Amino acid sequence: MGGAATDAAVRVDSPFPHPPRPDERVDLPRKRERWSEQKLSAYRDVADQLWQRIRRRFAKAGAASG
């Protein structure tokens, strides 16, 4: 979409971030959605692991007292 000047300006190391190109703006919601799905999946995995540890611990405690 951008011309040669835009492409060259993006490649120059600059302390100032360049504004997103139109094609980058379109992709941002998809990136956020993927990130959200990955984060939610990681939370679910941790919650499942914690529940398994809790169940094992209380199953052992119940067996020892009963």
Image (cartoon, rainbow, N blue to C red):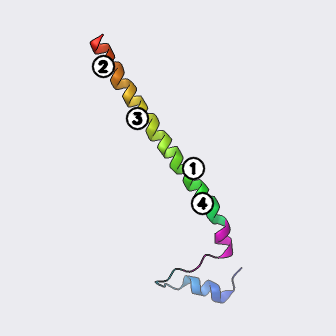
**Please, is residue 57 above or below residue 39 in the view?**
above
Q: CA distance from mark 3 to mark 2?
A: 17 Å
Mark 4 / mark 3, whichever is N-terminal: 4
Residue under numbered circle 1: 37
Crowd rating for badge 2 (residues with CA inside 10 Å; few <14, some 14–19, many 20+): few
Mark 2 / mark 4, whichever is N-terminal: 4
Residue under numbered circle 4: 31
Q: CA distance from mark 2 to mark 4?
A: 45 Å
Mark 1 / mark 2, whichever is N-terminal: 1
Q: Amino acid at mark 3?
A: Leu
Q: Residue furthest top?
A: 66
Q: Secondary structure at mark 1?
A: helix
- The magenta stretch is 18-26
Question: Is residue 3 shown in magenta?
Answer: no
The residue at 60%/87% (across/down) is 8
The residue at 69%/86% (across/down) is 3
Q: Secondary structure at mark 3?
A: helix
**Please, is residue 32 above or below residue 24 in the view?**
above
Mark 1 / mark 3, whichever is N-terminal: 1
Crowd rating for badge 1 (residues with CA inside 10 Å; few <14, some 14–19, many 20+): few
Residue under numbered circle 3: 50
- Residue 54, image x and y in percent? 37, 29
Quadrant containing the N terminus is: bottom right
Q: Residue furthest left?
A: 65
Mark 1 / mark 4, whichever is N-terminal: 4
**Please, is residue 24 above or below residue 8 in the view?**
above
Q: Secondary structure at mark 4?
A: helix
Lateral position of residue 6 relative to residue 14, left or right? right
The image quarter in which residue 18 lies: bottom right
- Residue 45, image x and y in percent? 48, 40
Mark linked to residue 61: 2
Q: Secondary structure at mark 2?
A: helix
